Each structure stands twice: as structure tokens, then as C-alpha cells.
Image: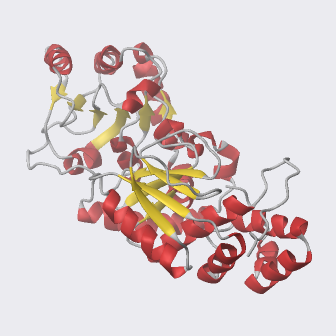
């Protein structure tokens, strides 16, 4: 998320970009590198993308899986690629990759860096998708972004993004998983624990080896410190061990509920999770979040590496106002590292991003920018 001087954006006019390509591969590479930095806020997005597509002429290969809303992603991506005149191929996830050199390849729900490879997967809201070189959640590139780069974002811009984006999401009750109509517990001002599927892949990113035992220790540490604790099991995570653990903590005053996230988050004092999407939603509600695992949104949360010290970590989290920084992080995450399928422009900008990174030489590599393929 590098910051670029607005004066440099003027150098990126599509006509100037084309002239730099004709005159100097070196200067063209520098221009494309700048363009990759400002893809989320430059003008003439389609003009720029169409020019880069004509210059580099990459094929596009996109894997697909049934379900997980990937059909909506493919439809949005297909529309964006058609708008820049690209040739693209869909192939079933797990099938052999179509033969084509130097294609831009997008694979569904995968991780691991590879040349010209990208990963896409539904993010924490049903209309948002991760777009990442490394993967998703704690495996993502966004997880490795330096705090200073997020902090350097303009606070007024972040506040404006939050104001025009988040209230509508909350008012509409949009969430990734359907919520039931069970009323919330009468207790207010509680610490809310959002459980996950204990064998989900992201559980590998927990700071402690035993997820269920760590959650139990954290709940009891906070409960014994005098806090009201409410916990909701994941709808697909009600394993015998999880339910036995919940029965045990209920004996010590922890409240187990099936209430809607929409009813619980506004009333929570803080939210504790491993790296669940509920942690991201809690940031939309501007609640303090404690993460017991690596998470891409962990920049704006407080990490909890020792479940036995959860009460102390909670006290520290409640004593610090992270909301201004969280708004900056949400803007960066939702405009640069995720794509909003409701917006054709948002997908157009991601196509510009992928084309720019396809062409530009890696930092410090000494490699020239991609040349025009032979006719």
C-alpha cells in the first residue's frame, strides 16, 4: 500500500504511459510500477487497463468451484475482462491448468505464491472477495503489510469511506452466514466469544496448539475477572468436544447463546475470536477485537497469544482507542486487497492492478518490464 505523491499521478496519463513504452522499456516499467501503487484511486481506469492488455497480451485463466458464491465472482471478472478486450478461460478447480505461457492465473480458495498467480475467495461479507498473491486470512499479503503503511493513509479519506460504506451494511444486517431469530441474552455490556469450526484450515494459524482448550481458558480467565461472557458456537462447528466444553464453561457462569450476530455485536463490550469473520464484523461495529490466531484484519485487533492471560489482554484492549486506525485498515483492505462485486468499477480496478503487477519488474530484480509479444 505505498503512498505516492499526487503529482506523480499526472505522469500516468494513458497517452504518457504509451509514449514511455515506445521510448523506453525502463521508464515504462517505472510508470507501470507507479500505476500499481495508485490503481485504487487513479482516473481513466478502463483506458489504462485496455492499453496494458494490448501491450502485454496475457491470457487469463480462472479456476472455478461450485458454490461459495464463486459464480458471482466469475461473472464480475468476465465482465471486466470483456471491457478491456482480454481472452480468458475458466477451468474446474483441481483440473489441469490450460497450456498457455505467461498467463495471469486466478485460483479459488487457494494459497501460496507463484509467478503471475492470484487467489480469490469470498471474504467476510457475501459481496466482498479476497484478491491476493499469497492467499487469504493470516496467509494473505495484507497480513504482512507494515503498520506504518496503513497508518500513512489519510484519516479524512478513511472516515469518509467508513461513513459511506459501513452504516448501510449494518442497517441491512448483511453477514456471511444466515442468522436465526433467537433473542439475545438479557445481559448487556458483555465480552462476546465467536467460535469457529475447530477443523477449519484457518485454525492452523492459532497461536496455541489446542484451539478448544485455549478458548476455554480465555473464557474462564475473563469470566473470573468479573466480566460477563457470552459465547456462540459456529453453526458448522458443534462437534462433541466443542459442545462438551461449552457445557463445562456454562457451569462457571458463561452464557451460551444461539442469538443473531446482529443482536450480539452492538451490545458487546469486546469480541474474542481466533480469526473468524465475526472479528472483521466487530470492527465494522467499532468494537475492540482480541485475536487468538493470525488474521488479515489483525492489524486493528489485539493479539492474544496466551489464553491464560486473556483478562489482562482484554483490559489493555479496552484501554486503547483503535477506531481511527481501524477505519484506515478497513479502507485499505476493502479497496485494495478485496473487491466489491456490487461495483463494476471495483473489479475494473482489480484488473488494472493485476495487469500492472503482471508487467512490472519485481523490486530490485534488474529485470525489464514485459515487452510486447511478437505479432
Q: Residue at x 18, y 37 (%)?
A: 235
Residue 57 locus on image (x, y percent): 65, 71
Residue 70 locus on image (x, y percent): 34, 57
Among the 4 quarters of the image, the one containing residue 245: top left
121 w.r.t. 174: above or below: above
Residue closer to the observer: 286 or 29: 29
162 w.r.t. 245: above or below: below
Q: Which scheme is used to colour this image of the protein? A: secondary structure
Disc tally is 0
**Which quarter of the figure is the N terminus placed in?**
bottom right
177 w.r.t. 318: above or below: below
**Which quarter of the figure is the C terminus placed in?**
bottom right
Residue closer to the observer: 188 or 116: 116
Q: Taking 294 as reference, is 246 left or right?
A: left
Q: Residue at x 40, y 32 (%)?
A: 202
Q: Residue at x 53, y 59 (%)?
A: 331
Q: Taking 106 as reference, is 1 left or right?
A: right
Q: Which residue is situated farthest in the left direction here?
A: 182
Asked whether residue 182 is in view, the answer is yes
Residue closer to the observer: 354 or 60: 60
Q: Residue at x 43, y 32 (%)?
A: 290
Amino acid at each position: 500500500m505505498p503512498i505516492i505523491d499526487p503529482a506523480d499521478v499526472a505522469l500516468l496519463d494513458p497517452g504518457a504511459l504509451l509514449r514511455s513504452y515506445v521510448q523506453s522499456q525502463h521508464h515504462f516499467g517505472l510508470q507501470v510500477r507507479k500505476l500499481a501503487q495508485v490503481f485504487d484511486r487513479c482516473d481513466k481506469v478502463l483506458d489504462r487497463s485496455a492499453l496494458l492488455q494490448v501491450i502485454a497480451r496475457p491470457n487469463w485463466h480462472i479456476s472455478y468451484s461450485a458454490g461459495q458464491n464463486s459464480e458471482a465472482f466469475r461473472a464480475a471478472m468476465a465482465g471486466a475482462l470483456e471491457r478491456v478486450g482480454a481472452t480468458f478461460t475458466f477451468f474446474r478447480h483441481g483440473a489441469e491448468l490450460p497450456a498457455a505461457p505467461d498467463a495471469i492465473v486466478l485460483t479459488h480458495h487457494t494459497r501460496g505464491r507463484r509467478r503471475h498467480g492470484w487467489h480469490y475467495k469470498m471474504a467476510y461479507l457475501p459481496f466482498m472477495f479476497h484478491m491476493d498473491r499469497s492467499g487469504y486470512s493470516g496467509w494473505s499479503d495484507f497480513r504482512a503489510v507494515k503498520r506504518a503503511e496503513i497508518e500513512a493513509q489519510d484519516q479524512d479519506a478513511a472516515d469518509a469511506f467508513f461513513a459511506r460504506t459501513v452504516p448501510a451494511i449494518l442497517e441491512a444486517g448483511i453477514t456471511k452466514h444466515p442468522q436465526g431469530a433467537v433473542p439475545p441474552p438479557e445481559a448487556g455490556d458483555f465480552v462476546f466469544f465467536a467460535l469457529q469450526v475447530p477443523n477449519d484450515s484457518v485454525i492452523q494459524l492459532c497461536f496455541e496448539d489446542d484451539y478448544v482448550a485455549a478458548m476455554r481458558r480465555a473464557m474462564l480467565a475473563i469470566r473470573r475477572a468479573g466480566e460477563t461472557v457470552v459465547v456462540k458456537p459456529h453453526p458448522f462447528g458443534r462437534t462433541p468436544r466443542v459442545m462438551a466444553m461449552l457445557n463445562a464453561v456454562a457451569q462457571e457462569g458463561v452464557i451460551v447463546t444461539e442469538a443473531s450476530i446482529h443482536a450480539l455485536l452492538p451490545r458487546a463490550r469486546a469480541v474474542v475470536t481466533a480469526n473468524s469473520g465475526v472479528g472483521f464484523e466487530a470492527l465494522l461495529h467499532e468494537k475492540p477485537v482480541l485475536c487468538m490466531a493470525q488474521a488479515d484484519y489483525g492489524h486493528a485487533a489485539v493479539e492474544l497469544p496466551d489464553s491464560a492471560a486473556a483478562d489482562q489482554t482484554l483490559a489493555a484492549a479496552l484501554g486503547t482507542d483503535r477506531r481511527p486506525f481501524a477505519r484506515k485498515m478497513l479502507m485499505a483492505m476493502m479497496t485494495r486487497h478485496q473487491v466489491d462485486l456490487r461495483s463494476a468499477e471495483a473489479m475494473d480496478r482489480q484488473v488494472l492492478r493485476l495487469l500492472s503487477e503482471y508487467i512490472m519488474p519485481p523490486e530490485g530484480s534488474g529485470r525489464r518490464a514485459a515487452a510486447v509479444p511478437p505479432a
